[in-house]
Amino acid sequence: MKRIALAAFLFVTLVLSAAEPAPTLRRNTVDEVIAAMTPEEKVLMVIGNKNNDRRRYIGEGSTWYCARLGLMPTVMCDGPAGVRMKPFRDGDSTKAYYSTAFPTATALAATWNTELVETVGDAMGNETLEYGADVLLAPAMNIQRDPLCGRNFEYYSEDPLLSGKMGAAMVRGIQSQGVGTSVKHFAANNQESNRKGVNAVISQRALREIYLRGFEIAIREAAPWTVMSSYNRLNGVYASQNRDLLTTVLRDEWGFDGMVMTDWFAGDDGVAQMKAGNDIIMGGFPHGHYKYHQPEILSALSDKTLDEEVLDRNIRRILGFVKKTPSYREYACSLKPDLARHAQVAQRAADEAMVLLKNDRNTLPVRKPNRVALFGKTSYDFIAGGTGSGEVHYGHAVSLKEGLSNVGFRISSAADRFYTRFVDSVFAAGGHKKYAVTRSQEPRIDKALVEAEAKVTDMGVVTLGRLSGEGVDRKEEGYFTLTDNEKELLGAVCSAYHALGKKVVVVLNIGGVIETASWKELPDAILLSWQTGQQGGAAVAELLRGTVNPSGKLPVSYPVSYADVPSSKSFPGIPADLPVNSYYNEGVYIGYRYYTTYDVPVSYPFGYGLSYTRFEYSDLTLSSDSFPGRIDVSVKISNTGKVAGKEVVQLYLTAPAVLQDKPERELKGFAKTRLLAPGESQVLTFTLDPRSLCSFRSGISSWVAEAGRYEVKIGASSQDIRQRASFTLGKELVVEKLHDVLAPNVPIKDMGTTSAKVLGTDQPFDHYHELDYKFNWHW
Ligand code: BGC
């Protein structure tokens, strides 16, 4: 019966629409086009499509196209480290179309240079445009909650301010080319384990202060054309079906007026997605899931469980998006972006991304390129980026061996031969060329060979590599920690070289955080090169010989052990093999917020990084010693060393914690100096607005600044505070009252809502949080 009614409904609307001359998007208004659509066409409009010519080469999906209504197909392509597309095209086997592999997001965040990130975005946007796409599915802005998340390399930081500012810069850069971005994955997609089903259980406070905050900054400051909702559930409801998230917070509170798309094949209820304000369901046709979304939405329309107005509203946003695109403008893409120029941009970003973790007795730079032996398979197969949708099919990536040779280092042949033979044997065994070597075990190298190399070379370089990607989280053993073969290699190289009074440098070609505390005493220098795109090997070479002075700092803490990470006790949720619920018990105490508040030692703190020069911090000035609504902070940074360099300066704030417990310090501003010559100074300025003073008080759903004394700490890292000053706030300020939404659907013990000082202890709720608990926690 239901089917007959549906068929009749469709027939009538089709006949009616066929009788009218169809308005088109070019000649008519969006509302006129919507009014001319049949219900069936409306449903096609809200389900993504893959079916257009360019899609064979580029793009993970597109919007529906329809000649009758003058609708263009628009093309959306991945991803955060550059345009992901197939290099080879049908009927054109002689030519390859490559895109530039830029440093991964974590590496970009390590530059702490928003201008530079905007320039990278501009180059990525240009490749998006010139290769024929309309939207780059980037930036990915989830918080790096736990070092084992497989996609951390696609994300910026453990800190929401740094993530937000980086994301905003990237959006501005990409969109300056007249193409769109998709800020993703909104929200709390902080793990890959059961990513399409897991329920992230997060207190309202941790959500607002940590997991939503970066998105809020990027959306308010840079107005991305689109947002991609995430796969996971958030406090009981799929993100893509979560009205509180996608409408109340995103649109009503933050003023987002663009289009929201699902992540590919996310959620389980297309009608709920429509109602939530998730305008379009991706990936859609021709994949299987359109087969149930299409009838599902159509019958909801016909039986009026879905108001047609809701669909019209979503389509209005989709068509608003379509009208902005290069496809709509009929832009004739050249297929010829300036790859040589973009490679230079990629290299500049790689130069600034690298973090010098250790440099005993000025091991680096090696001013005159000398003879080096390269150990570790990754030296010969340097990793440009991670796998999955964040992967980029670049033309050529500079390996470490190539990079060092290009600037005059002489690479010793014995180790080279050993590793070249190893690499050849891996390929001969039939491995897929790109990742076969990276995924293979580190080969065991003969001690005698290492000792012989130590005799004939001036320095040993050991590269340790890690690869990860979408779909799986990483393991602690052998991924976070070194493998036995890696430990053996490092031990052998260090003892052979040190026995002869020669130095060893470790290069970390990794996407995120690994264990360093147990072995960092061994080498003389450690350079964290991250996965810095196709120019990574070239950038390492410039840093080793000192033509570039390292200026990157850590966007994420390096803990002593995995057990020290506050989320390690609950990641990836329960049950661990296919988590249903992932409990964010640490609340707002993630990363340095936890380590500094609870005095937990780390191996390298958030914000840390060495330079070949020294910087002095002086003359900290606050525009007022009480808070009149805004405080300007300035500090003078002087290069007191012998070479030119740039310094990343961080402003942390310690807020009074009377009614609410608070992290000991929180990042509220950062800046990077220009290249300062020896003896040169620069005054950096920061602004503290009312929101900078606030914590989120969930009992009253408001951003509140407590009355009392605020301490400004200017640091070279989160643990190296160089200047301090304070101001007072006379009276509590309720800066913004928000909706009481997104409360956890199951009980959670949250460090931010208990007085427990140590994770896992069972202490009672304190007074304030009892209130919080009564008002807010629905279970
Ligand atoms: C990823 C997204 C990506 C999309 C399209 C999904 O699996 O989570 O980040 O943009 O695929 O490739």
Image (tube, grey):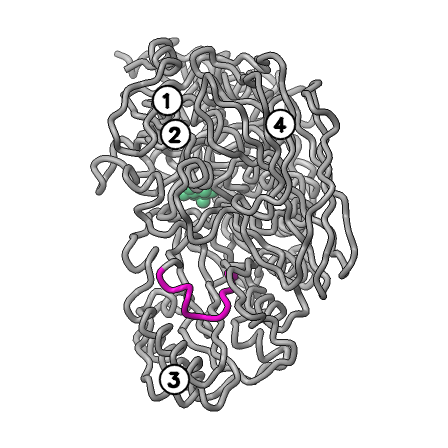
Q: Is mark 3 on a helix, strand or loop?
A: helix
What residue appears at the point 64 percent right and 45 percent down from the top-left corner? 649
Q: Give the range drawn in magenta.
A: 518-529
Quarter of the image for the C terminus: give it. top left
Quarter of the image for the N terminus: give it. top left
Sequence-earlier tag: 4 or 1: 4
The amino acid marked with disc number 3 is Val
Observer able to see residue 257: no
- Tags 3 and 1 touching, CB below 8 Å: no
List x then y, in percent, for residue 203. 38, 23
Q: Which label number is shown at residue 753?
A: 1
List x then y, in percent, for residue 287. 37, 39
* Distance from the alpha carbon under mark 4 to that under mark 1: 28 Å
List x then y, in percent, for residue 274. 44, 20
Q: Quadrant of ligand 1?
A: top left
Write down the quadrant of residue 275 in the picture.
Answer: top left
What residue appears at the point 72 percent right and 58 percent down from the top-left corner? 640
Sequence-earlier tag: 4 or 2: 4
Q: Circle 4: is it few (<14), some (14-19), or many (20+) Cα within 10 Å?
A: some
The amino acid marked with disc number 1 is Thr
Q: Which label number is shown at residue 587?
A: 2
Q: Circle 1: is it few (<14), some (14-19), or many (20+) Cα within 10 Å?
A: many
Q: Is mark 1 on a helix, strand or loop?
A: helix
Q: Circle 2: is it few (<14), some (14-19), or many (20+) Cα within 10 Å?
A: many
Residue at the disc numbered 4: 220
